Amino acid sequence: MAATLPSFWMNASMIHSIKIVTFTLCAAICFSHFDAHAQAGDESADRIQIISPAHPVWLVEKPYAESPMLTASTYGDSAYSGYHSKATLEISCHPQNPEAGFRLQIAPQALGFNSGAFEGPDVSARGSMRITTGTRTAVDHKVSGSWTDGGVFQVGTIFSFEAPIPRDELAYWASDASRGQPLQLLLAPKAGGKLLTATFSLPKNNEGLKKVVRRCLSTVAATPVRL
């Protein structure tokens, strides 16, 4: 007589099979979703495109269907006082604004960082943001800070540092020479406090980033649009 499996083994086997089927369906749905984003399709139909699917991941987003503004974003690492946490970088450009919207977004609680000192429209008296692209000379920028939603790469409420970016730096990011270059951001408090650092990598295939940045470089508007 053939041996029969105990009922609890049969139940466990059935549950395991169901889990495999469920995982397979979920994976198929998720990857087909990302494949759709990765294709250079109609922006009005799908407002997010993956422009660099391997590390570093960069996305191009059209946040508002009625606006020509484009945003390129990626994620990297932020560090403060020995703690590390994910950081997000956003570069936004509007054809009626020669200045890019440049935002470094972090989770202050995860780093033990007091963001209150940097909250406001212009807190340069308390510190500045130093941006270094590859081996280029580091440049200090005025910085503003505010709370915002996490977006694509982070969840919950996060803190956003904003800084103006010179046109020559934007032009370099839109050039082939910038491909794969490291991008380091330092927030240097003037009171002699600890440095907040964030590191990113510019995309090796920068066609999507060029598409975003050229919107800032193509037009100088008499009345800039706030990004």
Image (cartoon, grey):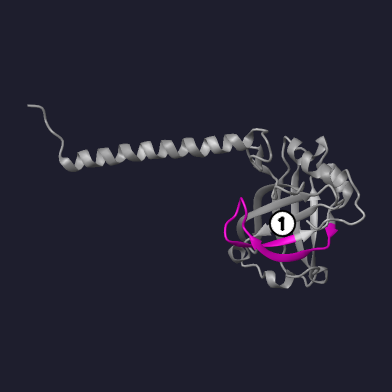
Q: What amino acid type should be assigned to the residue bearing mark 1?
A: Leu
Q: Position of residue 165 (x, y in %)?
A: 84, 53
Q: Which residue lies at the image location 72% right of the left edge and 36% below the top edge?
A: 204
Residue furthest out toward the left: 1
Q: From the image, tell me which residue sits under label 1.
A: 104
Give the residue displayed 73% in from the left and 61% down from the top. Answer: 161
Query: Vertical placement of 175 versus 103: above or below?
Result: above
| Nearer the observer, 201 or 1 | 1
| Location of residue 188 by image quarter | bottom right
Q: Residue at x 85, y 47 (%)?
A: 169
- Seen from the viewer's position, the closer of residues 37 and 170 is 37
- Whole-percent x and y of residue 2? 10, 27
Residue 162, picture quadrant:
bottom right
Residue at 55 percent of width and 38 percent of height = 33
| Whether residue 56 is visible | no
Write down the quadrant of residue 203 in the picture. top right
Callout 1 secondary element: strand
Q: Is 195 one of the magenta-colored residues?
A: no
Q: Position of residue 85 (x, y in %)?
A: 60, 57
Furthest-top residue in view? 1
Of 167 and 199, which appears nearest the observer?
A: 167
197 in relation to 49, above or below: below
| Horizontal relation, residue 210 to residue 77: left or right | right
Quadrant occupied by the N terminus: top left
**Whether residue 210 is situated above or below residue 183 in the rendered picture:** above
Q: Position of residue 26 (x, y in %)?
A: 45, 40
Which range of residues does the magenta coloring cover? 140-161
